[in-house]
Structures are given as structure tokens and as C-alpha cells.
Amino acid sequence: MCGPLYENAIMSLMTSITLILEIVHLMNMQNEENYNIKNDDTFDKAFNINNNGDNSDKMFLHSISENETKNISMQNLSKRIYKRQKQTIMMSVKDALHTMHRVLDDEYEGNTETVETNNAYGRILANNIESSENVPFYNTSTKHGYAVLVSDGKSKRRVLKAHLTFAEISVVPGTCVRVRSGDPIPNGATAVVTLANTKVLEKCSDNDDDYFNIFDKEYEIEVLIAPKVNENIRNADCEMEHGQIVLQIYSRIGSVELGILKLCGINSVPVIQIPSVGLLSIGDKLEEPGYTLTLKRIYDCNNITLISLLKENGYNPVDLGISAYQLKAIIKNIKYALNKVNLLVIMGHANDNDLLKPILREYFNAVIHFGRVEMKPGKSTTFATCIFNHKIKFFLCMSANPVTIPIVAHIFLLPFLNGMHFDVMAYEPKPNIQTCIMTTHELHHRPKFLWTTLHWSEKETFSRACRSKKQHQNILKYQKANALLMLPQRTLHESKIDAAFVSAMFLG
């Protein structure tokens, strides 16, 4: 039987064990902190410690904040990174988009390059384009017939033999020249008489067209109706004049635009450089497809999902792979990425309590413009900027949930990239339309985004959203979707929504 002395001994033992565990935990935290700083060559380079030859990192230090880092200690920096962070202010989706647009307009200028017209499909023009020629370059005939002098009136005319170039032919009184629709008007001619208003006088055939098609034969015709000046003649430069602006700055070059450029004799054009974007995953549980999964690990599908989506929209993202969730690894991978791209998309550990945001603030001196968004999923979506090697760099950080990634990409990533590309037609998110939902949806205290498929019928003037009865979101819903439902947030009086019209972002 256990008496009071035994119970007191047990309690004392448990208290001692708890105290020992807390001491060990604190020692481990201190050791980890010391390891990450003192043994981290990334920190050594940034603060020019035992490093005499890396000028690029010295320049990086200066561009971050020379005054702030002049007397800073490595231990203080580590403590600031590991210190519990305050929650960032939550923004609505509308305000977050407005913030991204404002930052882009204020801080990003973009770069230009010149490409051959044949390789310009899909690019964005960096300047207005002026026609280098009159189009057409000369007066042309709008009908099949005979180029004549109006002053000859209704009379007989000798049809001259055709020449390889109309410049070698001159129409004089009493003569005319065969022309087809689109042919240049011969020198001197002031009108074109159609075949229906002429009669062949020298016949060796019952068909007048036989004479019209024999270019090396001279014969005589009679003009039956007095022609008018410029009748059936299209003047030079009637479509485009030399020096006329034919394409506006920031126009996307498609098939019609390519035709216009070629018609104007333009062989190269200035375009906006396609913005560089990199994709980095952070997590210790992620594995590259192709490797055998070990316990508690999953394959990383987010990179390939975003890579494919960006390529579909004309971008060529850089796959930066997977970074371990460790201070040294995260900093090293972000620095490597910023040397390659202007926009870094980071997937994973974007929560306020994770390391990513304090690393951006304390190490890269980044400005976090928003760190939480009022949406579900996608609450931890973060947008930040920093100066790296004297250049503006952008961060878009998000949850690594495969359901969240495509939603955040369509709402934030694609519009922002289109803005960096100065693609004014695609700058805003896809249009919102009203659609009818027939199933019951549980509302959330944040606005909710759900994948759906919109259908139209001939008998209705609106679309209907088709969703399964299961409300659980997964990547399979994205596979068949053509729109994002945007459900309102829950209120005290309304926790569900059923058979109503709601907004949807139609993706096509």
C-alpha cells in the first residue's frame, strides 16, 4: 500500500524531472542558436567576418542597411530572428491586391529588349510602333478591268501588252492596260473600267475573258460608260500612313499584330523583358518525386503545379527545389534565388509563428506589406519587398497546402506577374460573374474560395455552379474546375448559404 511519504516522493521526483527537461531544452535552444550563427558561413559573409574577397556580399550588406548593421552582433540578430513575432495585420483580398499594385507602380520600372518580329508572338510592346511605309505603298485597283484615262471618255482604246512591272507601262491617250484587283495602277491612269462596261472589238473567240487573260496580246476595246476620276482606284496610304502609330505601347503581340508589323516592313520591335520568377518550397517533410518516400514524408506537387500554370501564361519559372526548414538553409536558398530572379515565390512556413517572416525582416531587411489575408484558404499569404544588390526584389509567400497554392496563384500571383510584364489587359484578376449555387455551403468567418465548374443552358441567362455534396477541398476539385466560387463570410445571422447567387471568378 502506498502511504503519504511515497506520494510525496513521487511528486518530488516528477518535479525534478520536469525541471531537468526544461534546462536541457533551454541548453539545446542556445546551442542551436550558437550553431546557426557562429558556424554559418552565410552570416560570416553578410557581416564580412573572416571574409576578405567577397565584394558582392559586402555590396549586399550595404544595400540592406549599412547604419543598422554597423554595430550589430550576431547573437542579437539570432535572438531577433528566433524571437516570438507579433501577428501581422490581416487585409481583405481587395486591399491586398491594391497594395501589390501600388507597390509595383511605385517601385518597379521593368526592363526592355529588342526581338525579331518573327519571335515576338505573345510579347508586350515597350514603345508605340509607327509605320515605316505607306500602306499600300502605291495606288491599286479595286476591281478586275482596264486602267484608262478619264479624259478619253467613252471611246475605243488599244490594250497594251502586259509587262513584268507596271512601272514600265504608261497609259497615254487612246490606250489602256489590263489590271486585276490589287494590282498597281500604271503611270498616267486615272480610273479603272470594269469588264462589264467594256466590249472587245477584235474577236477571234466568243469569250471576252480570253483576251483579258492573254497578257502578250494587243487588241482593241470600246469603253461603254464614261469613267470618273479615281473610279475603282484605292489610293496609296489609305490604310496606314508613314509615321502613323499602328500599335500602342503595352499591346500584347498576337497574330493580327504580327501581320501589321510585317505589313509596315518592321523586322524588329522593342518589348518588355519577361519577368523572372523562382519557386522555392520550404519543409522537412517534402520529397522530390522519383525518390522513395520515408515515414512522415510526402511528395512535393506544388512546384510542378505552379510551373505548369506559369508556363501556360507565358512565363518561364526557375525551379529552386526544396529547402530544409533550418535558419542556415533558408537564408542560403533565398540569397541564391535573389541572384537569379526578381520575384521569389516561397511555398511553406509562411505563418506568423514560423521562421520565414523574421528572416525576411531581420536578415534581408524586407518590408512586409501584408502578412495575412482575409480568405480561406490562403490566410498566411504574404507579400514583401527588399533591396538586394541595389535592385528591388519581390516575395510572395504562401501555405504549402496543395489546395491553397492554385487559389493564391490565380488571385495574387498571375495578376502581379502580368503587372511586372506591363500586360495591362491581364493586370487585374479574371472577371467576376454572378452564378447560381444549388447546394448548401457552410460559411466561414473569412470569405471562402471553392473550386467549381460553371455550366450554361440555352434556357437560362445565368450560369450554375456544379459541386459535389462533399465540401472538403482537394486538388482533384481543381482538376475539373473552370471557376472559383467566392462565398461571403459568416455573420451572426447567417452561417450557411443555400440556393443563392454568389460571385465567381471565371477562369475559362
Image (cartoon, rainbow, N blue to C red):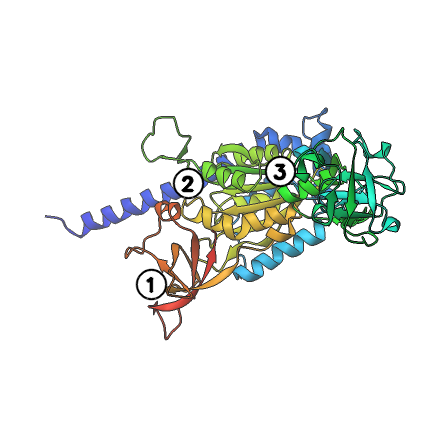
Where does residue 494 sit, x and y in percent of width and height? Answer: 36, 72
Q: Residue at x 65, y 43 (%)?
A: 253
**Residue position marked by numbered label 1 in the rendering:** 441
Q: Nearer the viewer, residue 216 or 414?
A: 216
Disc 3 on helix, strand or loop?
loop
Q: Is residue 265 above or below residue 216?
A: below
Disc 1 from disc 2: Cα separation: 45 Å
Relative to 426, 468 lies left or right: left
**Residue position marked by numbered label 3 in the rendering:** 276
Q: Residues within 10 Å of mark 2 (few under 14, many from 20)?
A: few
Q: Amino acid at mark 1?
A: His
Which of pointers 2 and 3 lies earlier in the amino acid sequence?
A: 2
Q: Amino acid at mark 3?
A: Ser
Q: Is residue 401 above or below residue 460?
A: above
Where does residue 83 sit, x and y in percent of width and height? Answer: 53, 48
Viewer-nearest of discs 2 and 3:
3
Relative to 166, 32 lies left or right: left
Q: Is residue 388 visible?
A: yes
Disc 1 on helix, strand or loop?
strand
Q: Residues within 10 Å of mark 3 (few under 14, many from 20)?
A: some
- Within the image, what quadrant is residue 439 found in? bottom left
Disc 3 from disc 1: Cα separation: 39 Å
Where does residue 167 sit, x and y in percent of width and height? Answer: 85, 34
Query: Residue lying farthest left?
Result: 1
Q: Mark 1 and mark 3 in contact (Cβ < 8 Å)?
A: no
Q: Amino acid at mark 2?
A: His
Give residue 25's mark: 2
- Within the image, what quadrant is residue 471 found in? bottom left
Q: How many marks can you see?
A: 3
